[in-house]
Amino acid sequence: EAGFFLWLKVKDGENFTKLLYSKYAIKVMPGKYLAYGKNNNPGKEYVRIALVHTEKKNNNSLNKIAELLI
């Protein structure tokens, strides 16, 4: 068993994280929390998704994430 991280570009990682949790109770990590820089933070447009659950649960969550991106 193993985990895998997916970095997804979403324009505003922190706001996307809050929206995803409030709508679906799915937790992801805003990319800016994992990088340095206040003004030029390279992670601010990303979220990090940990694919650590079963394939079924991961797919269900990824489908909900995709709904927010469309």
Image (cartoon, rainbow, N blue to C red):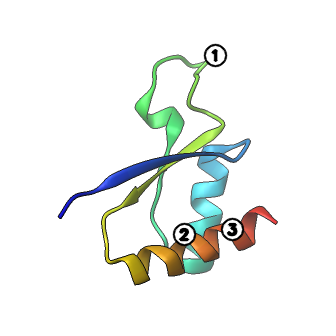
Q: Nearer the viewer, residue 57 or 31?
A: 57
Q: Amino acid at mark 3?
A: Ala
Q: Residue at x 56, y 70 (%)?
A: 62
Viewer-side label of 3, 1: 3
- On screen, residue 40 versus residue 27, left or right, reads right
Label total for image: 3
Residue 6 visible somewhere in the drawing: yes
Query: Which quadrant of the figure contains the C terminus?
Result: bottom right
- On screen, residue 70 versus residue 58, left or right, reads right
Q: Is residue 41 above or below residue 30?
A: above
Say what secondary structure mark 2 lies in. Answer: helix
Say what secondary structure mark 1 lies in. Answer: loop
Q: Which residue carries the number 1 mark?
A: 40
Q: Which mark is residue 25?
A: none
Alpha carbon of mark 1 to alpha carbon of mark 2: how far? 25 Å
x and y percent of residue 17 in the render? 57, 57
